[in-house]
Every structure is written in C-alpha cells, then in structure tokens.
Image: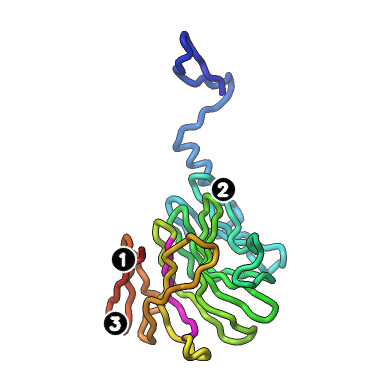
Amino acid sequence: MAVMFIGTGILLAPIAPFGSVLLTSSALTAMRRSTCEPAKGTTLVVGRQARIYSLPGSKPLETERIFGCLVSTGHSRQLNALPKPRYVFGKGRGVSVDTDAFALHAPWAAYPENFYGLDTSVLAVTVKNLRTGSTTYCRVGGNRRPMRPGPSVTDIALGRNGHVAWIGKSKLELFPFTFTRRVGACASIASREIESSEIENGEGIDLHSLILHGSMLTWINSGVTHTAALR
C-alpha cells in the first residue's frame, strides 16, 4: 500500500495501489474467522473469539489432530502435540487430550491432557494462550500404570486471566488406591508446571456442575450449591 505525504510530511491518507483491494475491519475479521473453520474440521467448542476443532489424523491414522484458533489472529495451534520441551511432569513418550471437557475464554483454552511415560502417566489440565502459545500444566493426578483406573476431569472453569478450576476424580493422598470426587484449581500461570490446590472433595459433588461468574466459582455438592473465589 502506498502512503501520500504532503507539504511538511504530515500523513493525510493511505492510498491503495491501482487494482488492489482494501479490506474493512469486518471483512478482515470474516477472513480470519474462515481460517478458523477449515472445510474438513469438526467443531468441538466454539465462541465468538475462538474455536477448537479437530482434523482427521495421520500419525497414527486413528489419532485426530486437535487445534485451537483465535479469530483475531486467524492462527491455529495444535493442542494434542508433544510440547517443547518435551517432558511434562517427567513424562515425554506420548500425549492424549480428553475432548469431553474443553473450556474457552479467549485468548485462553483449557483441556485435560494425559502425558505418558514408559509405564506410567500423569493427568493435567493444560491452559494454553492461543495468541502467544504460552502453556501451563496444572497437575490433577498420577502416576497411574497402564490398564489401571486413573484420574479424570469432567468439568473445567476458565477465568479471563487464565486461572483454571476443575471437577473430576483423583486419589486421596492418605488413601492412594481410593478415588474420590474433587474440586481443584490452579490460580496461577506463572510457572510451566503447577500442582492443583484442592478446594473440596466428597462423593456428593456433581461432576458437571462447575460454573464461573466473574471470579466466583459455584458447584453442587449433595444438592447444595457451594462457592469459592478463583483469584
């Protein structure tokens, strides 16, 4: 694009070269949004500012590739790829994403992710900035051995600052072979790897009841609404 300067060099107006097309802000947004909606993509979660979608996998064939895309940039980032550096909580042989519990709060995306070692795995809630790519791993539980029940995350609440809370099942420290329903949180994204802080545990917790209003979390335990602040 050419720019016209007149007199003392004061910028008056940009002038497009002959035959070029000027895009309005709405047209530019529409173009970026279209790049977040590839024809072969399957939408998993969508919001006004971001989208998570999957594409058919290739390595191996049965593995879908999962991406998060920010409309303001039109750039997609693969979510279920081995990170760099490769090891997360000491595991670096493989990774899988649970597609049943995504959360979006642009530019942030959060999702449960298993990291596999030689004979054990660790579950974390991954929080990724879709604009910068910066990532924090909030550890939920591990180390489970293959073919044994492991921890799970069924609901995620994601704040505008990237802080995250989750509901799921994991082991109690005093009873390592007993799983219980838990509400946990990572109210920091200052480090790459963070341990979850437990908010509450109990068999009456509704595994799909987590809601975030501003900074206030609510969930249901034995039919009663409980609250906590996510700072």
Q: Amino acid at mark 3?
A: Gly
Quadrant containing the C terminus in the rendered view: bottom left
Q: Badge 1: few (under 14), some or many (20 or more) residues near its Cα, within 10 Å?
A: few
**Regarding mark 3 in the picture, which secondary structure is present there?**
loop
Is residue 79 rendered to the left or right of residue 9? right
Magenta-colored span: 163-172
Residue 174 x/y as whole percent: 47, 89
Mark closer to the observer (2, 1): 1
Residue 112 x/y as whole percent: 52, 70
Is residue 224 rendered to the left or right of residue 174? left
Q: Which residue is mark 3?
A: 223
Q: Amino acid at mark 1?
A: Met
Q: Amino acid at mark 2?
A: His
Q: Which residue is mark 1?
A: 216
Residue 4 x/y as whole percent: 51, 15
199 versus 176 height, above or below:
above
Q: Are marks 1 and 3 in contact (CB under 8 Å)?
A: no
Residue lying furthest top in this view?
A: 7
**Regarding mark 2 in the picture, which secondary structure is present there?**
strand
**Residue 94 is drawn in which quadrant?**
bottom right
Of pointers 2 and 3, the one earlier in the residue sequence = 2
Q: Observer-nearest residue: 166 or 75? A: 166
Q: Observer-nearest residue: 219 or 231? A: 231
Q: Badge 3: few (under 14), some or many (20 or more) residues near its Cα, within 10 Å?
A: few
Residue 122 x/y as whole percent: 58, 76
Q: Which residue is mark 2?
A: 75
